[in-house]
Amino acid sequence: MNIENTKAQMRKGVLEYCILSILKDEDKYASEILDALKDAKMLVVEGTIYPLLTRLKNAGLLNYRWEESTSGPPRKYYGLTETGQLFLNELNGTWDELRNAVNLVTNSK
């Protein structure tokens, strides 16, 4: 079994949750989202994030707006919809439950 593949699958499993969490307080453009994920050591590439952002938008969890940039072409800023905020709230509870369950299992003697 390949440990790197398993680690990558674990990261992919929480990627949507992480993106929604990054957008909970303010709209961000894709590069900012990618930087936040990289800063958190999520090891995500651009080819992964754009299809995921589109899928979250198509699911009604995100919206976007174009904003002019002083340093290049206009930027697409993503933000949570009301449905996205409700979805994130549900995921927060689920994450707490899952983290507690995993901690109980992995820290048992």
Image (tube, grey):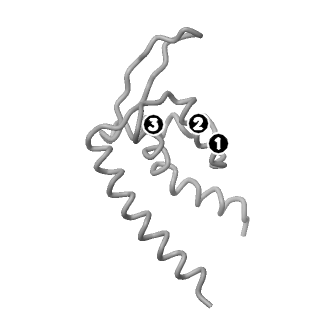
> Which residue is labeled 1 in the image?
38
Q: Amino acid at mark 2?
A: Leu
Task: Residue 92 in the image: state x and y as whole percent.
Answer: 39, 58
> Which residue is labeled 3 in the image?
53
Question: Alpha-carbon neighbours of circle 1 within 10 Å: few (<14), some, or many (≥20)?
Answer: few
Marks 3 and 2 sit apart, C-alpha to C-alpha, by 11 Å
Q: Is residue 39 above or below residue 17?
A: above
For discs 3 and 2, the disc positioned in front in the rendered view: 2
For discs 1 and 3, the disc positioned in front in the rendered view: 1
Q: Is residue 46 above or below residue 66?
A: below
> Which residue is labeled 2 in the image?
34
In contact (CB < 8 Å): disc 3 and disc 2: no
In contact (CB < 8 Å): disc 1 and disc 2: yes
Q: Amino acid at mark 1?
A: Lys
The secondary structure type at the circle numbered 3 is helix
Marks 1 and 2 sit apart, C-alpha to C-alpha, by 6 Å
Q: Quadrant of the N terminus?
A: bottom right
Q: Is residue 97 left or right of residue 2?
A: left
